Structure formats: structure tokens, C-alpha cells
Amino acid sequence: MRVVIVGAGAIGAFYGAILKRAGAWVEVVLRSDVEVVRDQGFVIDSPLGNLSYRPDVVHDSVDDAPTSDRAADYVICCVKVLPGIDRAALVTPWLGPDTQIVLIENGINIEPAVADALTDHDLISCLAFIGVSRIGPGRIEHKAFGRLTMGAWPAGNSVGCQALGALFAAGGIDVKQTESVVRERWAKSLWNTPFNPLSVLADGADTVTMLDTPGSETLVRACMAEVMAVAAADGHALPADAIGRNIEGTRAMPAYRNSMALDYLANRPMEIAAILGNVVAIAQRLGVDVPRLRMLDTLLAMRDVQAACGR
């Protein structure tokens, strides 16, 4: 099975290692660390053991001509969902008539921009539950987890999705196949949508700070309740105890900085629209009042204006 991973940062490199361990031919497309990865491959420290590997081909841009007469079976897109990044254009060079597109990315309602541009290809949407980071050129630290939830988009499952899930499972991670990947995205957004922007507005705060500061848990719960209301209006009601279970699970973890907090502290672009803005837009379309989420979205927009002015 030939797999091309577009955007082999921490997430892409990790899941490439899992596929490589399962016996797939794995090519990666990189914007940085190209020569390092060509020379030594990826060095990955993991609780799963030594996941270090050499990709079968390392491409330094999507302009490279594919190196095989056979098109990829799967093109996996792991780039951040950011304004101005055309993900459909990034994956197009690697597509053949039967190639399936896979998104392993954060956020809600992130699929249409790719699906609408590439209507002839099946789309598989995946949610990664993982703690992993890039700690140097070609070096990845996998701290915990790694489970994937995956399903055909917008709904259902498919033979191709099941085959890819079986490959990931053979590589050593837990895989959940779902008939409703949109509902699963709402379930993950219940945590991501409040915690990610709040961490940035609190100057990169970790989860312990965001729950133990007086009044903070109340705010987190209120934001989660707004996400629950939007999900229900969108036809994907979440269980009544979902907020409590998310809070309990977060308290059980060590202090943790989420992806948006890490991007903020490193002065990297943040997935604000995918994680928060899209929820607010869906709420507006469906007539659901989300005053706290709208406030967070406005505050982050104000922060971006200040950052653009150099303040």
C-alpha cells in the first residue's frame, strides 16, 4: 500500500511511523528538515518503543513529480487548517483516479474546503487523540496516546476506511471506526473549543491553571454548554454527562498545554477559525446564542490585530 503524507510534522511523522511499521510504503512531503530526514529519517521517542524510521521517499515540496508510476492509495493531509492554506491544492499532485484523501486535522467543518474541490475522490476524516511534539530537526517526542477515530465523510464508513484503519491497528495503535465522524468531531470540539482559546488568552496557560484558578472551571463549563447547544442544533446531540466526563478526564491528566497554547508560545499561526470560529459561525447560522464563544473569538481577533501592529 502506497501512502503519501502531506505535512509530516509531529502528527504526520508519528502516523507515518505507525503505517511504516505495518508494512506500508510511506512517502512524506516536508517544508522543513528535508535534508535531515533524508539523511537520518525520523527519530521518534515513544512509549510504544522505538518508532524511528526512514520514509521510502522524502519530498521537499508538493511540486516534486511523484516517483512511482502507481498513484498513491491514500494521501494523508496533516497540515494545520489555516486561512490562506489551500489544502486541496497541496494534496492534488499525489492523486490518481482511485486515491482516497485522508484528513488528520483539528477542528469542526474542516472537510468541505477539500471535498468540494476534489469531488471525484472519497474523503476519510480522522481525529487524533495524541500527545506528540517536534523537539528538533527530524526529532519527534511521542508522550502519550495515539488513538484515531475515523470515518467516511460526511457519514458512514467505507471499505477504504476500514482497510486504512486495519493498517493503523496493525501498526500498534487503537482505532475507532465510526458511522458519524461529524458527531465525533463535535465530541472533540467540546474540549478543544473552550480550552484552546482560553489557554492563549491566559498567556499559554496549562490545564491545571485553567481549572484551578477561582472561577475558571465555571467559565470552562459554560463554554462547553454552548458547544453542546450548537452540536445539538446541528443534529449531533452529545450525552448529558459529556461536560462532567471531560472535566474529570482533564483533572486526571498532568498539567498539559494544548496545541494552540504551544503555537501561541512559539509565535506560530494558530487554528483559531477551525477550532473556535467555525463553531461560532455554525451557531449563527442555526440561531444558537453563544455569547461566551463569541467573546473568545472577538478577543482572539483583537489579539491578532495587536500582534500585527507589533504590540
Image (tube, rainbow, N blue to C red):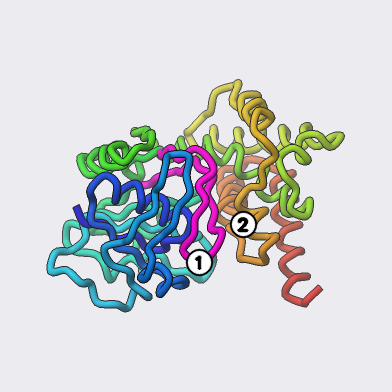
Residue 140 in magenta stretch: yes
Residue 45 numbered mark, or none: none
Residue 204 in magenta stretch: no
For mark 1, what is the residue? 137
* Residue at mark 2 to residue at mark 1: CA–CA distance: 26 Å
Q: Is residue 17 left or right of residue 23?
A: right
| Residue 122 on image: x %, y % | 26, 51
| Residue 143 on image: x %, y % | 54, 43
Q: Is residue 131 left or right of residue 115?
A: right
Residue visible at 53% across and 58% down?
134
Mark 2 or 1: the one toward you: 1
Vertical arrangement, residue 123 with respect to residue 220, above or below = below
N-term-proximal mark, 2 vs 1:
1
The answer to whether residue 118 is visible is no
Residue visible at 34% across and 45% down?
153
Magenta extent: 125-148
Residue visible at 54% across and 23% down?
239
